[in-house]
Image (cartoon, rainbow, N blue to C red):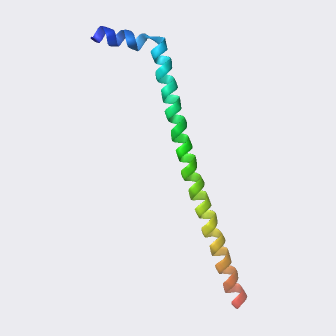
């Protein structure tokens, strides 16, 4: 059994498939991170715009 595992480990086709699977998983992870970062950026811009509107409102009242 150990010898079979060792042979599979040394098989370049299996290594290529593992590498492809790893790259695909990383791609999915980066896409998910990009969605999260975009959501955070959009929320931040919305909050910043709201703060500017409030600030302008206060200055106009004075």
Q: Quadrant of the N terminus?
A: top left
Hey, which residue is sitting farthest bottom in the picture? 62
> Left or right: where does residue 56 sit relative to residue 14?
right
Report the residue at 42% width, 11% height from top: 10
Report the residue at 60% width, 69% height from top: 47
Residue 13 coordinates in the image, percent (x, y): 48, 13
Whether residue 46 appears in this view of the structure is: yes
> Left or right: where does residue 31 sit relative to residue 1?
right
Residue 62 coordinates in the image, percent (x, y): 70, 91
> Left or right: where does residue 48 sit relative to residue 7?
right
Whether residue 62 appears in this view of the structure is: no
Residue 15 coordinates in the image, percent (x, y): 47, 17
Which of 58 and 16 lies nearest the eye of the viewer? 16
* 22 in relation to 47, above or below: above
Report the residue at 37% width, 9% height from top: 7
Hey, which residue is sitting farthest right in the picture? 60
* 48 in relation to 29, above or below: below
Residue 56 coordinates in the image, percent (x, y): 70, 81
> Left or right: where does residue 32 sit relative to residue 58?
left
Report the residue at 31% width, 8% height from top: 3
């Amino acid at each position: 059994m150990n010898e079979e595992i060792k042979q599979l480990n040394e098989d370049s086709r299996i290594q290529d498939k593992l590498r492809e699977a790893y790259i695909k998983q990383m791609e999915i992870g980066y896409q998910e991170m990009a969605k999260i970062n975009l959501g955070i950026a959009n929320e931040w811009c919305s909050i910043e715009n709201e703060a500017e509107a409030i600030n302008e409102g206060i200055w106009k009242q004075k």
